[in-house]
Image (cartoon, rainbow, N blue to C red):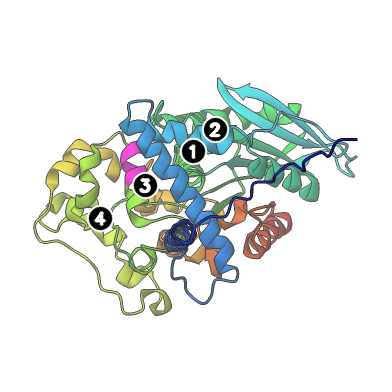
Amino acid sequence: MSDCAEPSIMHFRPDSATMRTTVAAIVIFTALTAYYVYIPLPNTVSEPWKLMLLDATFRGVQDMCHLVQQLGLGHHLKVLNFVITVFDMLAPQSSEIVKVTDTTFDGVQVRVFEPKRKLSRELRRSIIYIHGGGWALGSARMRAYDHLCRKMANVMNAVLVSIEYRLVPEAHFPEQINDVYSATRYFLQPEILSQYSVDPNRIAISGDSAGGNLAAAACQQLVMDRTVTTRLKLQALIYPVLQAFDFNTPSYQQNMATPILYKQVMARFWLEYLNGDPRFVQAMLVNNHTASDQSQLTSIRDRLNWTTLLPQSFRKNFKPVVQIMGSPQVIKELPALLDSRAAPLIADKKILQLLPRAYILTCELDILRDDGIMYAKRLEDAGIEVTLDHYEDGFHGAMIFALPPTNFVVGNKIMNNYINWLDKNL
């Protein structure tokens, strides 16, 4: 019997230089990641690290999309919207409690949510909902908006119409507001309301962020349209963007570096929406586009004087930023900046006096906070009843972050309070 040699086993033992290099690489990567993720936040934020991680993810995706555009592979907003929605779009799946249907109203795509439970009365309430996303992102078919509308339909036993308006870069102002107005006007026809068993006296229009902008603008258009016989009972605006005249209101100054909506990003959204020259961003950020040497802006400037429209608790110690000499070519090339269909906050008082009761939700940690508060004050001054619902721990977009893994306590609180207010007042 022959002896068999045992197989030799080779053990890899990295030398000290390799180990040092590996450790150094890990330390550098960790430090860079922490630097990218960490942002100083106010102590009122209840879940700071979750917000920082969400913001870092969003910024990372945005950076990638800008790179794609620089490589000539597509518009960065179109790529960004694809990334946001590709894994998040839901088919119109009905459930045991809500019937969901995709259809068109006057050529505009909409998703309709109808509760299935039996009614004690013949007609239901209804909410027309417009999603946010800087007029460029998002969809009525996204999981977050689908969840919101299903919940509203079920809790309120109401018919929800979620409008799928066209987006930048395929469409620019006024096409978005035209889509929303066309779909809303179509739905308000007596025969269509009858088809969905909707009470014509109990209809609201609502939206968040850019959707709040479109809801406010559509509401203003409706009160001036004498051919529309059905009138809205309520308007509910969730952290709406309402003006591009002053990018240095106290909330813009306070929250310019607060996630998830930054001052420069909002200016870029406005320029994309109005199909303006991106080089105008810097002029707008310092209010050069509305300098005091432009006498034609005096009446609008008076309507947006935040030193009188905002309570001291929101003005704090911030000072107005008014340039003496500015960049008149911005307004000249983008007259829509002064169009109330784009900026509902600048509407004439005689229009505001005709509007329905309003619910306006604002968040302290949001550059758009003062847009909503100023609109509430202008509506009140016009004799309109307004409920202003403010959240000290809220940030822009909080309400749509109410589902795992991006569910925030404040997001669920905002959503529930918003639905409860509608349920009590519609």
In the displayed structure, does residue 25 sit left or right of residue 264?
right
In the displayed structure, does residue 257 sit left or right of residue 133?
left
User: Disc 2 or disc 1, which is closer to the eye?
Assistant: 1
Report the front residue among 209 and 125.
Answer: 209
User: Disc 3 or disc 4, which is closer to the eye?
Assistant: 4
Label 2 residue SS:
loop
* 221 w.r.t. 171: above or below: below
Q: Quadrant of residue 408?
A: bottom right
| Span shown in magenta | 268-273
* N-terminal-most mark, 4 or 1: 1
Query: In percent of the image, x 18 and y 63: which residue is there?
Result: 322
- CA gap, disc 2 to disc 1? 30 Å
Report the front residue among 246 and 181.
Answer: 246
- CA gap, disc 3 to disc 4? 17 Å
> Label 2 belongs to which residue?
228
> Label 4 belongs to which residue?
285
Determine whether label 4 and label 1 are within 8 Å by CB.
no
Is any atom of residue 391 visible in this view?
no
- The amino acid type of the residue labelled 4 equals Leu
Q: Which mark is residue 343?
A: 3
Q: Which mark is residue 137?
A: 1
Q: Quadrant of residue 317?
A: bottom left
Q: Position of residue 385 (x, y in %)?
A: 55, 62
Q: Main secondary structure of the magenta part?
A: helix
